């Protein structure tokens, strides 16, 4: 298992791109907790803190596909770095101005969200030109999903550490400065500087004209909804048991399960169409969420949370392959960015729905939202099987600084090719 991942990291530029992307995405991965802590420290209410975080999330959802399309059109350095700087300046404005002026505070988080650079989609567009072989790219997708879990675990801890050492405002400034450095590391690399998207058909829908991609996005809206609901349901469960630490245990178990599942998934080579494999993984994901409604004792619930997380990273990694197969030619970064956006919007909806579910029926009902989300995701995949069975044009990349902008080289993920 480790040998396969080490093989990827030893490839030229791979470790730098993965690390730079994770560091560059740190502001986005920690923004919600940083905004809430800062707003509360400024004397703002929980309602205001939640509203600012929600506006940031909505702005990010709007900006990601737009910036992803710009990357496909103009290249990575000309979009990623300016966007990263503007996003950091938005958070800096919030840190300096505070929450006394509400219009200024909302404007700051809108700027920070809209200009969050699409580094996640950009990295997946680079993997084929960096790694070459199809098997290595697929393993990189799995490693990418695992690395995300690490980032979303370590990031909040880093924010709380900065808050305890300095202040919430300092945490906002430091985290976003680090994010700019991560983006800078990526865009200065040779693969990012020389990467060019394939020639694309001019169409206002861009990546969304792919029916297969729309089917995948519909499914992962519900996967995001399931995951978002668990964050609220976990708090309700911890309140029922009178210990805040229980919530930490549940989230840690969920993350640990995802880490294990992602590592095991990427350790082997898979045969057959990834669309069929994704249906099986999402079915197992839904099956893992359903027992959470039982809400047993803390030890048993922690085990169930770990089991529920096992198939999350494999589902995300497999979805990357499906996106690559169905994205219209020349829209790969935009397509990956739409996946990020849809997943995030689904998580926000799940969070919003789980709250009333707790009030109406208790903790078990809030976990039922997660189970329903998993089942709905599976239903979408099953009902769109024919659409997903016909891959669209795969992404293409131009290799090397000497390559002509319009000379596309297949990266090993050719149209209609199966794993």
Image: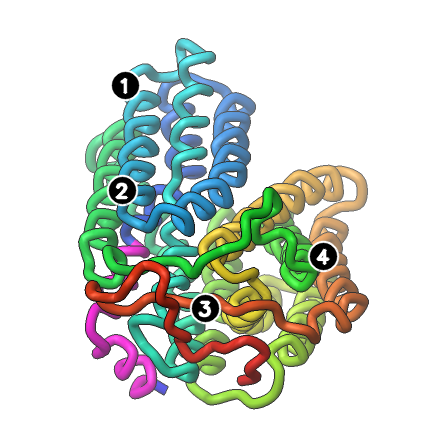
Task: Give the residue drawn at x 43%, y 67%.
Answer: 396
Residue 44, x across and y down, in percent:
45, 18
Q: Main secondary structure of the magenta part?
A: helix
* Mark with earlier residue (1, 3): 1
Q: Label 4 belongs to which residue?
A: 373
* Mark with earlier residue (2, 3): 2
* Mark with earlier residue (4, 2): 2
Q: Label 2 belongs to which residue?
A: 81
| SS state under label 1 | helix
Residue depth check, mark 4 versus mark 2: number of the one nearer the observer: 2
Residue 115, x across and y down, in percent:
39, 35
Residue 154 in view (yes/no): yes
| SS state under label 2 | helix
* Mark with earlier residue (3, 4): 3
Q: Label 3 belongs to which residue?
A: 256
Residue 252, x across and y down, in percent:
46, 61
Instruction: Pick the residue in front: 374 or 242.
Output: 374
Q: Is residue 4 inside the magenta stretch? A: yes
Residue depth check, mark 1 versus mark 2: number of the one nearer the observer: 2
| SS state under label 4 | helix
The residue stretch that appears in magenta: 2-22
Instruction: Pick the residue in front: 87 or 309.
Output: 87
* Mark with earlier residue (1, 2): 2
Rounded to the nearest angstrom, the CA distance separating label 4 from label 2 is 36 Å
- Mark 4 near mark 2, Cβ–Cβ under 8 Å? no
State the scheme by which the image is colored: rainbow
- Mark 1 near mark 3, Cβ–Cβ under 8 Å? no
Task: Give neighbour class at mark 4: few <14, some 14-19, many 20+ (Cα, 10 Å).
Answer: many
160 relative to 192, above or below: above
Determine which of the numbered discs, if any, sits on residue 96 in the image.
1
């Amino acid at each position: 298992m480790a040998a396969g991942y080490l093989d990827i990291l030893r490839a030229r530029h791979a470790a730098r791109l993965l690390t730079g992307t994770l560091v560059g995405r740190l502001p986005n991965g920690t923004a919600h907790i940083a905004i809430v802590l800062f707003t509360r420290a400024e004397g703002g209410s929980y309602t205001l803190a939640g509203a600012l975080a929600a506006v940031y999330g909505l702005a990010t959802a709007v900006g990601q596909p737009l910036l992803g399309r710009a990357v496909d059109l103009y290249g990575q350095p000309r979009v990623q770095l300016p966007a990263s700087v503007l996003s950091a300046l938005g958070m800096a404005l919030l840190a300096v101005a505070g929450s006394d002026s509400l219009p200024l505070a909302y404007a700051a988080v809108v700027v920070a969200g809209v200009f969050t650079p699409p580094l996640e989609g950009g990295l997946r567009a680079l993997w084929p030109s960096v790694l070459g072989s199809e098997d290595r790219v697929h393993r990189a997708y799995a490693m990418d999903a695992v690395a995300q879990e690490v980032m979303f675990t370590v990031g909040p801890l880093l924010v709380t550490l900065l808050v305890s050492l300095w202040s919430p405002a300092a945490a906002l400034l430091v985290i976003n400065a680090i994010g700019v450095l991560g983006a800078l590391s990526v865009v200065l690399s040779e693969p990012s500087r020389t990467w060019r998207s394939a020639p694309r058909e001019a169409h206002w829908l861009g990546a969304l004209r792919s029916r297969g991609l729309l089917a995948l996005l519909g499914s992962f809206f519900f996967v995001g909804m399931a995951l978002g609901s668990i964050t609220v349901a976990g708090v309700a469960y911890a309140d029922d048991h009178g210990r805040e630490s229980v919530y930490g245990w549940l989230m840690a178990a969920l993350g640990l399960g995802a880490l294990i599942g992602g590592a095991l998934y990427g350790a082997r080579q898979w045969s057959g169409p990834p669309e069929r494999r994704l249906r099986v993984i999402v079915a197992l994901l839904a099956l893992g969420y359903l027992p959470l409604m039982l809400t047993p004792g803390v030890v048993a619930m922690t085990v169930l949370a770990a089991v529920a997380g096992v198939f999350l990273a494999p589902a995300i990694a497999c979805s990357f392959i499906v996106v690559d197969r169905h994205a219209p030619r020349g829209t790969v970064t935009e397509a990956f960015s739409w996946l990020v956006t849809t997943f995030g919007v689904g998580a926000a909806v799940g969070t919003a729905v789980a709250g009333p579910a707790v009030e109406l029926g208790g903790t078990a009902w809030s976990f039922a939202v997660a189970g329903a989300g998993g089942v709905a995701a599976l239903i979408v995949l099953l009902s769109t099987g024919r659409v997903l069975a016909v891959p669209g044009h795969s992404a293409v990349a131009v290799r090397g600084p000497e390559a002509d902008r319009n000379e596309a080289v297949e990266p090993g993920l050719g149209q209609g090719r199966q794993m």
